[in-house]
Amino acid sequence: MRKLISVFIMIVLLFIGFEILAESESILESVVFSLNIFKNNIFPSLFPFLVLSSLLIRYGFVELFSDLFKGIMNKLFRIDSKCAFIFFMSIISGNPANAKYTRELYLNGEINKYEATKILCFSCFTSPLFILGTVTLLLNNKEVGLLILICHYLGNVIVGILMRGFHPSVTCHEKFSLKKAIDNMHMKRISNNESFGVIITNSIVNSINTLLLILGVITVCLVLTTIIDNNINLNSTLQSILNGFVEMTQGLKYISLEPIPLKLKCTLTVMILSFGGVSVHMQIMSILSDTDIKYLPFLCTRIICSIISSFLVFILFDFWINL
């Protein structure tokens, strides 16, 4: 069986190599497009947050965040309050930053394997800058951009609530104390005896490595979508959806150009955003490759989240537009 799999993979790789040579012009266009996405969207929106989050983790901000939001995380999601840092930072920065935050807290011993698997499932947010900027521009409608943002975030929150019973963490009913929270953060800082120069250098290097990984995965997925488009002829709308589930940005661009009702465009858009595309899934798998955090629950919850968020957009669209 393994030999058959190896032969199959070799045939696929040879076919991809042949396509790259035979369709070099369209492949090069895909590579240039991926570089433009990286330069214009991914690097500016992710790099500052990746460096900042790494510094915050090293300086004990997780402990402060944990004390501030332990009520929400314990009562709403039944998960360790330290996961609040991952949840709220992921809202701001977008995926796949949630995987990086989860990995760092897990490897630092702040959360266990089940908590890491659980928070990963409902913290996969698309950056609000991307939705309110790029997606709104593609659909040429500010109102639906905000609706997509709200439904996308609500989908993740609902998934988190549905997962309350998945390895629930032991809750702490101790009342919040600002003094104790600051003391915990200070103790964390004392335990970290590295200089600021070393910490910020490591944060920048790790963030650059993560971003280069993201660039590589996006480029590979865009090349694959180009090969698929060159060899599979589907209805243009179905082709756009297929592209979106492989590489999100390109698929959303094609969907916005389709001659279909705006309501359907918004529904398909939030479905793709909530699933993330194969590109985002590969990025997350690569970031978590040196851990034993489970991927299958993440995949299942992404499918559920895409269904929930698209259903919310579909039923709220007419009411939202008429407000």
Image (cartoon, rainbow, N blue to C red):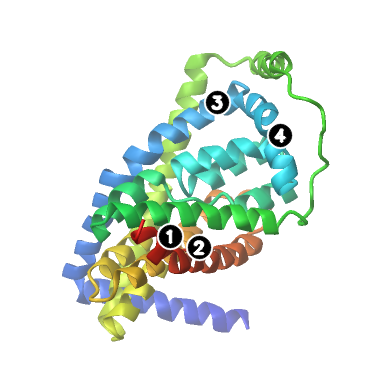
User: Which secondary structure, mark 4?
Assistant: helix
Q: In this rendering, does residue 16 appear at all?
A: yes
Quadrant of the rendering where the N terminus is positioned:
bottom right
In percent of width and height, residue 323 lies at 36, 56
Residue 268 lies, with reference to residue 51, above or below; the image says: below
Alpha carbon of mark 2 to alpha carbon of mark 1: how far? Answer: 9 Å
Dot 2 or dot 4: first in sequence order is 4
Q: Which disc, if any, is residue 70?
A: 4
Dot 3 or dot 2: first in sequence order is 3
Dot 4 or dot 3: first in sequence order is 3
Q: Which residue is mark 3?
A: 56
> Could you tell me if the residues under marks 2 and 4 are in contact, i.e. CB atoms within 8 Å?
no
Q: Which residue is mark 2?
A: 309
User: Which secondary structure, mark 2?
Assistant: helix
| Crowd band around label 3 with a 10 angstrom C-alpha radius: few (<14), some (14–19), many (20+) | some
Q: Quadrant of residue 254?
A: bottom left
Q: Residue at x 29, y 47 (%)?
A: 133
> Could you tell me if the residues under marks 2 and 1 are in contact, i.e. CB atoms within 8 Å?
yes
Q: Amino acid at mark 4?
A: Lys
| Crowd band around label 1 with a 10 angstrom C-alpha radius: few (<14), some (14–19), many (20+) | many
Q: Which residue is mark 1?
A: 273
Q: Amino acid at mark 2?
A: Ser
Dot 2 or dot 1: first in sequence order is 1
Residue 115 lies, with reference to residue 227, above or below; the image says: above
Alpha carbon of mark 4 to alpha carbon of mark 1: how far? Answer: 28 Å
Image-based side of 264 in relation to 111, left or right: left
Q: Quadrant of residue 255?
A: bottom left
| Crowd band around label 2 with a 10 angstrom C-alpha radius: few (<14), some (14–19), many (20+) | many
Residue furthest out toward the left = 25
Q: Residue at x 37, y 68 (%)?
A: 244
